[in-house]
Amino acid sequence: MRDGSRGLAFGPYPRMSLGKMFQHGSRRVRSIPTGIARRVKLPLPPTGRHMLARLALDEHPVGQSWDADSYQSVTPWTCLFEDVSLFGDGGIVVADGGVVLDTLAHCGPCRQWFVEGQGEVTLMTARQPARLEGT
């Protein structure tokens, strides 16, 4: 931690993706399945199949079409954070000594006060970050 022009600066922290944290057996971040993967039926086009027979379709490239009537979903899951630091109103999480890269995806450096360097992130706040203990 050091003093920055906008308040307190924390870091630099390495960027760490959730996937890598799961692979390396993080104690602070866990993935918990909340359901099972399944086949999901796609709805018919709004015009209905009876209209498709009356319309001339122009395919690009020629011979290509979408004939799938369903898709395979992914397994639904919840990400559980335990004993982490939470920075700013954007929800930037620091766990296991690094910034969880996935929590930066919806944040902006100007709004949430962080600076990205070569593979690292420095976070700046006006006050100490909130420490979330437990789950």
Image: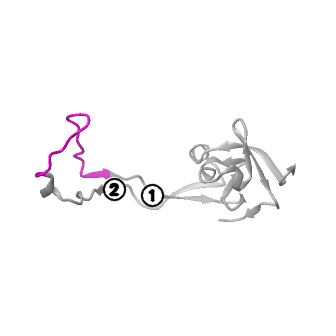
Label 1 sits on what residue type?
Pro
| Magenta stretch holds residue 61 | yes
Residue at the image point whose x is 26% and y is 59% from the top: 43
Closer to the N terminus: mark 2 or mark 1?
2
Kindly identify the amino acid type of the residue bearing the numbered disc 2. Answer: Arg
Q: Label 1: how many residues lie within 10 Å, few (<14), some (14-19) or many (20+)?
A: few
In this rendered view, identify the residue nearer to me: 34 or 54. Answer: 54
Residue 115 is marked as: none
What residue would you read off at disc 1? Answer: 76
**For the residue labelled by badge 2, is the local secondary structure a helix, a strand or a loop?**
loop
Residue 38 bears which disc, if any?
2
* Residue 65, x across and y down, in percent: 23, 41
Residue 45 falls in which quadrant of the image? bottom left
Mark 2 nearby-residue class (10 Å; few <14, some 14–19, many ≥20): few
Q: Quadrant of residue 88?
A: bottom right
Q: Position of residue 116 (x, y in %)?
A: 71, 42
Seen at 27% across and 52% down, the residue is 70
| Quadrant assignment for the C terminus | bottom right
- Which region shows up in magenta? 53-71
Looking at the picture, how far across and down is residue 128, in whole percent?
A: 82, 61
